[in-house]
Amino acid sequence: MFESFPEVCRSYGVKADVRSLLLLQKAIDRQLIHTVGDIYSFFKGSLVKDPTDIGPYTQAFYEYFVGVDVGAGERLNDAIARAETFKDWLEDFVQADDRRRDMELDDLINQFLDEVHTTTYDIKRVLDGEDILKEDDPDMKDDDGGDRADAANAERLLDKAADYRFVDLEELRKRMEKVMEQQTRDHQGGSHWVGTGGVSPYGHGGAAMGGIRVGGTGGGRMAREVMGDPQYYPVDIDAQINDDNIDATLATLKGVIEETNQRYLDIPLTVKEGVAQGGLFLPVELDKTEDKLQVILLIDNGGYSMDYYIRAVQALFKKMKTRYQHDLETYYFHNTIYKYVYEDERRTRKVPIERILSKDPNYRVFVIGDAAMAPYELHEGSIIAWGRISEKFKKSVWLNPVSEKHWHITWTTTMLRKIFKMYTMTPRGIEKAILGMNKKKR
Amino acid sequence: MAETSLWNGSDKYLCDRELAQAFHMARVLGMPLLIEGEPGTGKTELPLQYAKDSDIDLFVYPVGSKSTVDQFVARFDHVKYLRDSQVEVLNAQRDEKGLSTKLSTGGRSTDQLKDYVMQGPAAKAYSTPNSVLLIDEIDKAPREFPNDLLYALSHRKFVMPESGDVIEVSEEDMPAIVITSNREQELPTAFKGRCIYHYISFPPPDTMRDIVRKHYPKADDEIVQQAIDVFYQLRQLGLERSPSTRELLNWLKYMQTFAKAETMERIKKLDGLGALIKTQDDVRRVQRNLMDDIKKPGGASRY
């Protein structure tokens, strides 16, 4: 039952696997699941781990359980209106009472959602999928080369594969355990092994849920509520930093703060106090504070193209500074560096790069720039200067506001990428940059 | 047997259906409930009100940047132990010298190691069947804390340091565990995987009215409406620190001290703005954007 649901979820970027189904079984055993709405809430609680998952999860759920395929940026209502499931339902619904023809489309959709979410589901139902499962030998050995033959099989099995979803979960779990014992490597395709892309009952089944019995016990207007429309279009973490996603970025930036919760025994203080107390030595423990965070920002503020990003970056780091105490130094340059950078935005006060290079190597360096310039500007001297910075500060990254797909076009960008790890200036890019930085132990 | 019935909020707390369901699910499955959401949306209130309403013991562990699992479960107080053992030596010496007065060890005895075990909220909750355990603001914790915590929570058993006493709880008596986070830091995926997750979104104006009702049942409708209008308008400005439910409630509390006509006037003038807006930059921005706007007739209802 629902074996291919995790696969559908994964195709929308929501993490789900066998364990999600096992937990569902537990929930069914404990009488938590009565309606389709319960299944929605259950998976929402156990699969969604971030508000940005809610949209994709809802899409996956509606595709799998209701047969509604929500396109990118499409409103749920529109997607439902053109779904077959809805049209079939509408036909029956209107036939039952002629006056219903005059209802507004939105009301009809609400009615439909209500009924879907309150549909009772016969959980224990075991249907045709059983036959196919019987033919499959769970104790089959995992030899190389099995998948290709399986892949050929797959096409023939595809029709039947759709039926696996009705097989009893308990039965499937037992079999899955057996198969897992035998399985020794990753599988893609094929009809037997647990993996992706195949038609095995244990992984992706190619199943499209169509057999849902719409209409049930009725009552309770919850469908609209669970849809939570405002959350449906979450912060786009692949967009350039802007006012909307700056907080999301800030959350990822917290990763650069080094904190510790260790305590240490202060021996000199213990002795001093002990002597003062006439030989009663009580250990004095102090918190070890190591939350010093040092950041150098090198910002390319030459040309109009960078203006917009500079403001966003400055706002970001300024927010960060007010929230977490640390050393933040900002320098400016135009396109690239040679011997100097500048302290002020108008680039009048020169600072030799030697002064930067003489700083503590634990500083984290963020270079922010589009890395695009005339090839002659990035001559050998400049490359050496960048190299010295990247050599000295192991935790240095380049954040590029230009979309990654354009990077290979400019020669200078390609050159600089050989010196610095380059990331896009999006919340996701910054998160990756920080994770990469944290891995490097000085 | 732990209490696992569906709890739908109380007369003081408006618990939306989804949250109620997630909380119920967590309790039935014996998993911790992780609640995220903007500050001031009532994350911490859930376990507090639930414990109060159902008359259940509540244990709270506020997480800070220095939190350790030792504090959360139990730690052995070596300092006290050392002190008491030294006191015993001193007392023996005094005895020899014939002094009758003795230094006190506060009823503790160095023979009894468990006297020096300081139980944290987790140990206390586990030894109280059917209780509520709140782990507040876990995102403030040092990076390794959530994973350590996960390990501690995945076993229904704690071994006390040094004394070796075991605190164990059956699956039925597991405390209801609620963890809150403001999302200042991403939590490890493995950690989230073991929790039931719920994100409290910011309530729409209608729900906000109900929430205000719960807190101030006697408040005048018009005043509440006016205040909510202004409140949502302020939230539209994209301030550095947008006002939250908590701030609205505080503001209204202050507003209620005046007569109705005066209150309406004061709301229009954004009197007591300090209760809503918390940074100087934001105050300036509000003054620039809103002050004139709200004074105009009908201006406040436009958002």
Image (tube, coloured by chain):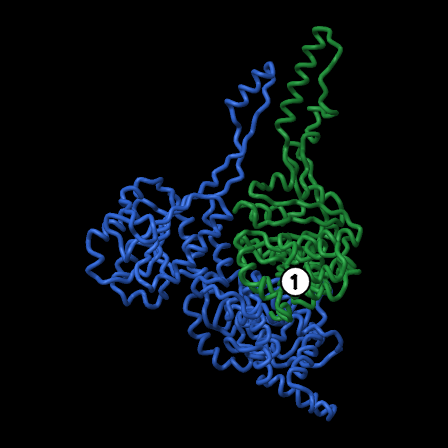
The answer to whether residue A178 is seen in the rendering is: no
Closer-to-camera residue (A24/A317) = A317
- Which residue is labeled 1 in the image? B268
Closer-to-camera residue (B163/B274) = B274
Instruction: Note whether A438 is above or below B104 in the view shown.
Output: below
In the figure, the blue chain has which letter?
A: A
In the figure, the green chain has which letter?
A: B
Give the quadrant of residue B162. Answer: top right
Closer-to-camera residue (A391/B202) = B202
Q: Residues within 10 Å of mark 1 (few under 14, many from 20)?
A: many
**x and y, in percent, of residue A382 in the image:** 23, 52
Q: Mark 1, chain letter? A: B
Could you tell me which quadrant the C terminus of chain A lies in? top left
**x and y, in percent, of residue A255 in the image:** 47, 50
Give the quadrant of residue B6. Answer: bottom right
Drawn side of residue A221 relative to residue B181, left or right: right
Q: Which residue appears at 51% of the width and 78% of the height?
A: A71
**x and y, in percent, of residue B52 in the image:** 77, 51
**x and y, in percent, of residue B33 in the image:** 65, 56
Residue ranking furthest to the top: B97
Give the quadrant of residue A201. Answer: bottom right
Instruction: Note whether A183 is above or below A128 in the view shown.
Output: above
Q: Which residue appears at 70% of the width and 79% of the height?
A: A115
